Image: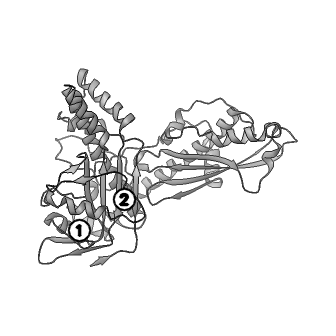
Amino acid sequence: MRQVAESIEIADTLAGVDVQPQEYTRLLGYPHGWVLEGRAAELADWAREWYAKDGRPWFYARQAECVEFDASTDAIRIDGVAFNSKRLHSALEQAGAHSAILVAVGAGPEAEEEARKRWIDEKPDEYFFLEVFASAVVEHLTTIAGARLCDWAEQRGMAVLPHSSPGYPDWDVAEQPQLLQLIKQTRSEQFPSHLDVFDSGMLRPKKAQLAVFGVTRHTERLQRLTTLIPCESCSFGPCQYRRAPYKRAPRPTGEPLPVRIKVLDSDAQYTVNRRALQRWSEERVAMRPGLDGSIDVEFRYDGTTCTNMGRPLAFIYNVKLGPRAEGYPILEQCCGPAPGDAGYTAMCKYVADPESLMADIESEKPLIGQRLNSILKWRREPNAAGCYCEASSRNHKWGLVLETIHYSLVQKELSEETETS
């Protein structure tokens, strides 16, 4: 029996899923490199737009308490529940896996229901393209989950192995019911969506997947056991922890190896000179990574009022970013006076109408829900005033904050690339 001290549990519903066009095209049955045109392109765009508006993707992951290997059979026990998979048993045992993370993902029932309606309405094309897009969402969610787990494990000197699921080679899909029952034994988080399974192993809603990811501290073994290198089984291009190219299938002679896709523009054209951004990133920015891959950022702004003899003031900006795997989406934004600072009370708009001004400052959340890279395209009116009286001045400061955060993360990633090259 191998028990673990560290623990992770994540339950999340996502605002959007960025399915890669090439993965969607592959699932539609087109050959590699095919570009959709005409009616097919219209249907593909329609399915993507419909899902972006009405789809409800989700995923759940939790670490198992213990993993046991049966030496006489191919059975593996996860939290006391036996599963018979020679492939999973061999992979975890060879890698010296001390734990496993149980994952469930789903595209949500909405897409299936809409596809069913299209079929009833005798619109088989719309039915097919939406069904396939939901399948692509499930694949993408499993990949995203793996990327977030890699992030968590990397920070602790561990590695996450390629996942396996009932229905894969050497794992009977009929074992899916007991895996779902095990996954639903949540701890502090609620299971994010309704999910059932038939005795046959078929999930309901069907656009879902259950998976087991092994976790090992013996990262040196992965260099010797090439079949266990997780990156070769992972199609997520933007992952910052990629150690080897993705190998879905043999490539034609001369086809280049996949390259790491950047989620932030390292050649960004900022509105502020880089020397200032460098100084601010060192002096004003504090970042705290979360277990779920998110990042909490705090930025302190020091300025002065434009009246009352230029009294100094200070505001604290808090920004919560989603995981790198999702492009650092801006999940939360807030701004308020720094604790103990009263300089803001001397601003002319505060003197005239304090409640209105502070309500405006609190409610403004520019770029919320967008990826951090969108700061590079945000066109705002220049206003370098040190106070917060005008909306343009407040937007100007938010721009400085987000550009500094963007710059800080770009420099961090460039440094990591240098260390691993």
Callout 2 amino acid? Leu
Q: Relative to residue 53, is residue 362 drawn left or right?
A: right
Q: Position of residue 62 (x, y in %)?
A: 35, 63
Q: Secondary structure at mark 1?
A: helix
Q: Secondary structure at mark 2?
A: helix
Callout 1 amino acid? Leu
Query: In which image quadrant can residue 76 be found?
Result: bottom left
Disc 1 and disc 2: Cα gap in Å? 16 Å
Q: Position of residue 93 (x, y in %)?
A: 21, 71
Residue at the spot 25% in from the left edge and 34% down from the top edge: 115
Q: Relative to residue 378, is residue 83 drawn left or right?
A: left
| Quadrant of the image containing the C terminus | bottom left
Foreground of the two, 15 or 420 = 15
**Image vertical order of residue 333 relative to residue 42, above or below:** below
Q: Is residue 242 visible?
A: no
Q: Earlier in the sequence, mark 1 or mark 2?
A: 1
Colour scheme in use: one colour
| Quadrant of the image containing the N terminus | bottom left
Q: Position of residue 142 (x, y in %)?
A: 30, 51
Residue located beneath label 1 in the image: 92
Question: Dot 1, crowdedness within 10 Å: few (<14), some or many (≥20)?
Answer: many
Residue at the spot 39% in from the left edge and 34% down from the top edge: 53
Residue located beneath label 2 in the image: 149
